[in-house]
Image: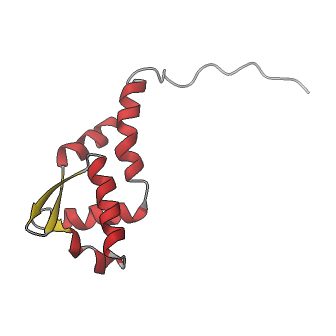
Amino acid sequence: MKLSKPAASCCSSLLTGRLTLDEATHLAVPFRALGEPVRLQMLSLIAAQPNREVCACELAQPLGLSQPTVSHHLKIMYEAGLLERERRGTWIYYRILPEKLVMLRESLS
C-alpha cells in the first residue's frame, strides 16, 4: 500500500478575527443565558411585542410555567445584560437591549 503525499493546506488561516480570552469570557455570559430553550422562547415573546417589553406576569401562561420560574429566567437574562427592567408599582416590565443582541450577532460574523 502506497501512502500519498501530505495534502497542501487548503484553508486560509483561522487566526484573523479571533476573540481574545477576555472578549470570549465576556461574551460567554449572555450566550450561556441563551443556552436554555425557555429563555430563547421568552426573548422571542418579548421581541414580538409592539413595544418590545412585557410584564413578568404576562409570560407565565403562554410558557406554561409558574411565576417564580419565569422570574428566575428573567433574572438570569437581566444579569447577563440581555434585558433591562423597570418597576411600575408592584409589576416589573422587561425590555430587550437591542444593542446587546447586535453585539452577540457581530461577534459571530
Q: Is residue 19 visible?
A: no
Where does the image place residue 86, in percent across and percent down from the top left? Answer: 12, 58
**Quadrant into which the N terminus falls:** top right
Most extreme residue toward the front is 90
Where residue 42 sits in the image (x, y, percent)?
Answer: 30, 65
Depth check: 107 or 28 in front?
A: 28
Residue 61 appears in the figure = yes
Q: Residue at x 36, y 37 (%)?
A: 27
Q: Position of residue 83 (x, y in %)?
A: 22, 53
Which residue shows up at 23% across the image and 43% down it?
100
Q: Does 84 sit above or below residue 64?
A: above
Residue 89 lies left or right of residue 40; in this view the side is left
When asked about the image quadrant of residue 10, the answer is top right
- The residue lying toward the viewer, choosing from 46 and 13, is 46
Residue at the spot 17% in from the left edge and 67% down from the top edge: 54
Residue 29 vs residue 105, the one in the foreground: 29
| Above/below status of 37 relative to 104 | below
Q: Is residue 99 left or right of residue 38?
A: left
Q: Residue furthest right?
A: 1
Q: How is the image coloured?
A: secondary structure
Asked whether 35 or 16 is in front, the reply is: 35
Tell me the quadrant of the picture where the C terminus can be found. Answer: top left
Please give the count of numbered marks on the rendered protein: 0
* Percent coordinates x, y for residue 5 in the rendering: 75, 18
**Left or right, residue 7 beside residue 31:** right
Identified at 29% across, 48% down, the residue is 79
